[in-house]
Amino acid sequence: MRTIADTVGDRSSAGVSGRVTRGSIIARLERLPGDAMQVRARILTRFATFFDGFDVIASRPRCRS
């Protein structure tokens, strides 16, 4: 059974030259194309974050002067 340590250590099967670091693994994952489900999830998360922030701003008590 292969583990992450074996996969990272085995550079020949990954086609990677040089040192394999966490940053290089993350960079390779970010270069992968996203599918439609991931795009929809990102859009939904952004809308939810926007409206959550808007709700916090809109529901704060207003100062009367």
Image (tube, rainbow, N blue to C red):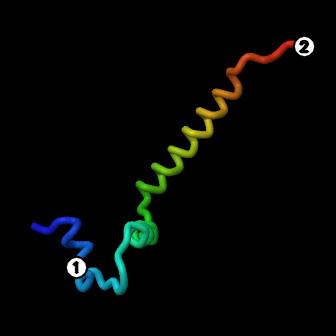
Q: Estimate the x, y position of residue 16 in percent, counting from the top left.
A: 33, 83
Q: Amino acid at mark 2?
A: Ser
How crowded pointer 1 is (Cα within 10 Å; few <14, some 14-19, many 20+) is rated as: few
Disc 1 and disc 2: Cα gap in Å? Answer: 69 Å
Q: Is residue 27 above or below residue 36?
A: below
Drawn side of residue 7 relative to residue 52, left or right = left
Camera sees residue 11: yes
Q: Estimate the x, y position of residue 21 in percent, counting from the top left.
A: 37, 71
Q: Which label was assigned to residue 23?
A: none
Residue for point 36% across, 80% down: 19
Q: Nearer the viewer, residue 7 or 51?
A: 7
| Residue at mark 2 | 65
Is the C-beta separation of discs 1 and 2 under 8 Å? Answer: no
Q: Residue furthest right?
A: 65
How crowded pointer 2 is (Cα within 10 Å; few <14, some 14-19, many 20+) is rated as: few
Answer with the quarter of the image where residue 10 lies: bottom left
User: Which secondary structure, mark 1?
Assistant: loop
Q: Residue furthest top?
A: 64
Q: Nearer the viewer, residue 47 or 61?
A: 61
Drawn side of residue 10 relative to residue 19, left or right = left
Q: Nearer the viewer, mark 1 or mark 2?
A: 1
Q: Estimate the x, y position of residue 59 in percent, counting from the top left.
A: 68, 21
Quarter of the figure that contains the C terminus: top right
Q: What is the tally of numbered marks visible in this picture?
A: 2
Residue for point 66% across, 32% down: 54
| Residue at mark 1 | 10
Q: Estimate the x, y position of residue 50 in percent, counting from the top left.
A: 62, 39
Q: Is residue 3 above or below residue 52?
A: below
User: Which secondary structure, mark 2?
Assistant: loop
Q: Amino acid at mark 1?
A: Asp
Quarter of the figure that contains the N terminus: bottom left
Q: Reading the chain from its start, which is encountered first: label 1 or label 2?
A: 1
